């Protein structure tokens, strides 16, 4: 599952003109779990960008290291940790890309997955709230993963679910019929995403150079010649 995000230079106002920015956007070329991450939620009838802790921490969680940063789509209805949040508290995490690791004979090669046009991606997620006092609380989030599509399956078996912009209202509205929400838990269209290998320096979460996103090989992407 995805354990790092690339969040740089997102034109969110162009993507969502009505977006209200409640906290400064979190940017990083190599964002790891257990850190703040910017998420878009529906609140008081408007889309709001807010900072959440990346790692789902329900009130009964005793060990912070056990906070999951990803949830498998297939377990959302059966696992108590995810069920209630998925039903009523969904969000999206806007990114410029995310990292995956291809298993090699003696190591793992990191790849950066992006929109083929480098447009922002809206990754489906869920969130929960943990009250530390009657008035103080922490909101946390976990990405949702689905099976990789045929284009990127040679690199990994799981990818974050990508929510299309036209389906954003359905995804974020807690009153949406759950069958409509479940219909969005699908692999990304073949032509949407591409991936290229990057330096293994990204294996170190402390590495925060722009070079994280520099290709060290060609992009893998779907072409019309691959159509059946």
Image (cartoon, rainbow, N blue to C red):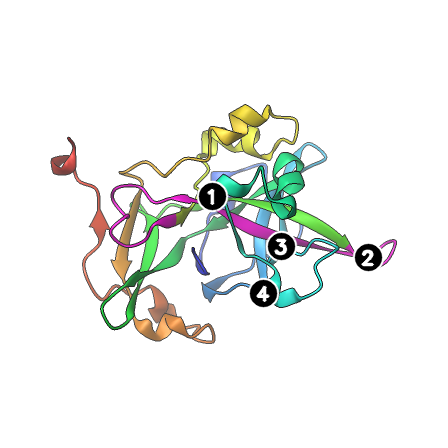
Residue annotated with mark 3:
56
**Kind of element beneath mark 1:** strand
**Crowd around label 4: few <14 · some 14–19 · many ≥20 (10 Å):** some
Residue at the image position 50 percent from the left and 65 percent from the top: 32
Q: Mark 4 or mark 3: which comes first in sequence?
A: 4
Instruction: Estimate the x, y position of residue 16 in percent, counting from the top left.
Output: 52, 38
Residue annotated with mark 2:
136
Q: Which residues are magenta?
A: 131-158
Which quarter of the picture shows residue 208?
Answer: bottom left
Which quarter of the picture shows residue 223?
Answer: top left
**Crowd around label 1: few <14 · some 14–19 · many ≥20 (10 Å):** many
Q: Is residue 206 left or right of residue 137?
A: left
Disc 2 and disc 1 in contact, CB within 8 angstroms: no
Question: Label 3 vs label 1: CA separation?
Answer: 18 Å
Residue annotated with mark 1:
122
Q: Mark 1 or mark 4: which comes first in sequence?
A: 4
**Kind of element beneath mark 3:** loop
Q: Mark 3 or mark 2: which comes first in sequence?
A: 3
Disc 4 and disc 3 in contact, CB within 8 angstroms: no
Q: Mark 3 or mark 1: which comes first in sequence?
A: 3
Residue at the image position 63 percent from the left and 35 percent from the top: 87
Question: Label 4 vs label 3: CA separation?
Answer: 9 Å
Q: Is residue 11 left or right of residue 142?
A: left
Camera-near label (2 vs 4) is 4
**Kind of element beneath mark 2:** loop
**Crowd around label 2: few <14 · some 14–19 · many ≥20 (10 Å):** few
Question: Label 3 vs label 2: CA separation?
Answer: 17 Å
Image quarter of the C terminus? top left
């Amino acid at each position: 599952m995805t354990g790092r995000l690339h969040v740089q230079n997102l034109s969110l106002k162009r993507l969502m003109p009505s977006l209200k920015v409640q906290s400064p956007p979190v940017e990083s070329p190599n964002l790891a779990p257990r850190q703040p991450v910017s998420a878009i939620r529906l609140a008081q009838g408007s889309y709001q960008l807010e900072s959440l802790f990346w790692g789902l921490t329900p009130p009964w969680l005793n060990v912070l290291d056990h906070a999951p940063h990803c949830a498998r789509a297939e377990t959302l209805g059966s696992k108590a940790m995810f069920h209630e949040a998925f039903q009523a508290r969904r969000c999206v995490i806007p990114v410029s890309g995310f990292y995956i690791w291809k298993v090699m004979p003696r190591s793992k090669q990191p790849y950066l997955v992006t929109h083929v046009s480098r447009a922002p991606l809206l990754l489906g997620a869920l969130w929960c709230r943990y009250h530390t006092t009657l008035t103080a609380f922490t909101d946390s989030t976990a990405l949702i993963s689905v099976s990789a599509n045929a284009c990127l399956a040679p690199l990994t078996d799981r990818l974050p679910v990508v929510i299309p912009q036209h389906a954003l209202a359905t995804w974020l509205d807690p009153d949406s019929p759950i069958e409509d929400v479940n219909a969005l838990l699908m692999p990304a269209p073949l032509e949407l995403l591409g991936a290229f290998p990057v330096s293994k320096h990204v294996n170190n979460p402390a590495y925060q150079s722009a070079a994280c996103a520099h290709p060290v090989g060609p992009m893998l992407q779907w072409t019309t010649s691959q159509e059946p």
